[in-house]
Amino acid sequence: HLMILAGRVLMASRFLVAHDPPVAITLQGSLGDCWLMTAIAGMAEFPSVIESELFMQQEVQPSGQYEISLYDPRVKERVTVTISDKIPCHPAKWFDEKRPMFAQPNGNEMYVLLLEKVGARLRAEKSANASGFMWRLP
């Protein structure tokens, strides 16, 4: 059974970008988005840019809502996407460590989970425009 947990429960930091050493900060999960994980790992070299250019909030939000500013090539400008921190996780017993199903941050880097989720949403919206059907990710 799939578990959905708030990112703020999975990560033990009050900051989205924990400034851990950027070596091996992301591991690909089961989504098959190595291209995105590579881009996120490259951005990890510049944590202040992630904080100032992408995220409107720098601390973990009790509401679980985040605004992320990204360039959208479809409209050729920056757009702000609001996303929740609800993350699909592998099934686990109460005593097991909870692990996200997809991106696997090495440490308390919640921004990795949120950027992957935004990437999935934008990709779903792009597919929806082509097919007329849209998935809605919270």
Image: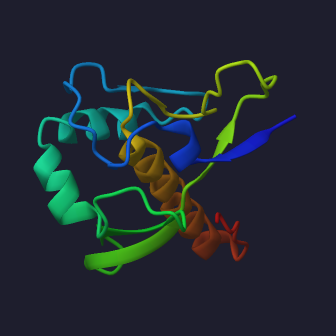
**Which residue in the rendered view is the most extreme toward the right?**
1
The quadrant in which residue 29 appears is: top right
Residue 55 falls in image quadrant:
bottom left
62, 99: nearer the viewer: 62
- Is residue 72 among what the camera can see? no
Residue at x 29% of width, y 70% of height: 56
Q: Tell me which residue sits at (38%, 34%) in the image.
A: 108
User: How many badges with numbers are in the image?
Assistant: 0
Q: Residue shown at 22%/20% (left/top)?
A: 23
User: Residue 70: percent from the left, percent from the top?
Assistant: 30, 67
- Rendered view: 61 above or below 79: above
Q: Which colour scheme is used?
A: rainbow
Looking at the rendered image, the quarter that the C terminus falls into is bottom right
Residue 16 vs 42, above or below: the answer is below
Q: Residue 61, located in which quarter of the rendered image?
A: bottom left
Is residue 18 left or right of 32 when viewed as pictured? left
Quick check: 116 left or right of 38? right
Residue 122 horizontal/vertical position (percent): 49, 64
Above or below, 38 against 66 in this view is above
- Residue drawn at (54%, 32%), measured in percent from left and top? 32
Dividing the image into 4 quarters, which one contains the N terminus?
top right
Q: Which of 28 and 19 is in front in this view?
A: 19
Residue 34 in view (yes/no): yes
Who is closer to the viewer here, 3 or 63?
A: 63
Vertical order, 81 against 48 (above or below):
below
